[in-house]
């Protein structure tokens, strides 16, 4: 685990923070802090992966194509992870698109520098393998959720996962965005959000959403939320 001194830059991303101090300092010159702007495309589907991103705050959604103009969220990456993990697995093109869901910042690294570090025999590959397991657990549990659970419970899960990564109960989100995230029509999103609002679990107005009763929102969510949360809490410890 990285131990910093007063002269060290802060390490917000959990993967980078898990590195031994000497390995992080070796990695640091190749990292560039960039802003993550809400709605910004990080990757398009099929695009060559030229950079990997270690979010320090904010959220990036991974979207799979359903039809030509339809997408479904298959993963959420915050400061616990990395966007561009396919590169580590030997794939140089993104099979999903990646879009900023919550504004923040990330440390960006060139693909070539990242791969060089992965081959240096340090701790990074082991950390990335453990993260890959965590991401696969999220994706597989989300697939179960989409198949078997009602929209309202899925929406509650999604809001809680977003709040955990953003570390705030207030964030911007549109019905169109939620429709794409959950793979349902906007009418279904409107009905489910309206129900959660009537139960005084959330407040939603003009594209801004606030969680006002997290404890009961967790009760409204499906069990998938707890399974994903507990897996991510165990990371990056082996």
Image: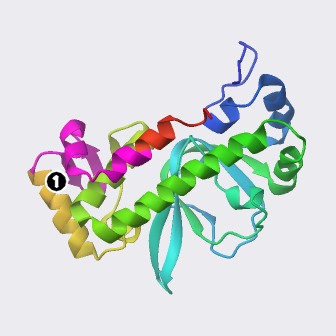
Can residue 70 be seen here? The reply is yes
Splitting the image into 4 quarters, where does residue 46 fall?
Answer: bottom right
- Is 34 positioned to the left or the right of 80 in the image? right
Region rendered in magenta:
199-228
Q: Position of residue 200 (x, y in %)?
A: 12, 45
Decide whether residue 213 is among the magenta residues: yes
Can residue 33 be seen here? The reply is no
Seen at 22% across and 61% down, the residue is: 152
Q: Mark 1 highlights which residue?
A: 196
Q: Position of residue 88 (x, y in %)?
A: 76, 56
Q: With respect to residue 74, does 121 lie above or below?
A: above
Seen at 31% across and 74% down, the residue is: 184
Decide whether residue 134 is among the magenta residues: no
Q: Position of residue 208 (x, y in %)?
A: 30, 52
What colouring method underlies this structural image?
Answer: rainbow
Q: Position of residue 194 (x, y in %)?
A: 15, 60
Nearer-the-camera pick, 52 or 104? 52
Tag count in the figure? Answer: 1
Q: In what element is the residue under mark 1?
A: helix
Nearer-the-camera pick, 230 or 5? 230
Splitting the image into 4 quarters, where does residue 150 fall?
Answer: bottom left
- Residue furthest front as drawn: 238
């Amino acid at each position: 685990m990285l131990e910093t001194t007063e002269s060290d830059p802060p390490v917000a991303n959990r993967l980078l923070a898990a590195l031994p101090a000497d390995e992080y300092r070796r990695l640091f010159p190749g990292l560039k802090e960039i802003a993550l702007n809400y709605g910004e495309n990080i990757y398009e589907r099929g695009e060559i992966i030229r950079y990997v991103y270690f979010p320090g705050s904010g959220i990036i959604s991974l979207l799979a194509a359903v039809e030509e103009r339809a997408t479904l969220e298959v993963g959420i990456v915050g400061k616990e992870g990395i966007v561009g993990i396919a590169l580590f697995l030997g794939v140089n093109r993104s099979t999903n698109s990646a879009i900023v869901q919550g504004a923040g910042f990330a440390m960006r690294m060139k693909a070539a520098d990242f791969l060089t570090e992965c081959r240096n025999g340090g701790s990074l590959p082991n950390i990335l393998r453990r993260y890959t397991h965590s991401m696969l657990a999220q994706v597989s549990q989300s697939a179960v959720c989409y198949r078997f659970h009602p929209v309202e419970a899925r929406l509650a899960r999604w809001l809680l996962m977003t709040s955990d990564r953003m570390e705030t109960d207030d964030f911007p989100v549109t019905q169109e965005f939620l429709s794409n995230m959950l793979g349902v029509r906007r009418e279904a999103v409107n009905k489910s959000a309206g129900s959660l609002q009537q139960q005084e679990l959330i407040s939603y107005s003009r594209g801004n959403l606030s969680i006002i009763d997290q404890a009961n929102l967790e009760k409204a969510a499906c069990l998938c939320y707890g399974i994903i949360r507990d897996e991510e809490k165990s990371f990056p410890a082996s």
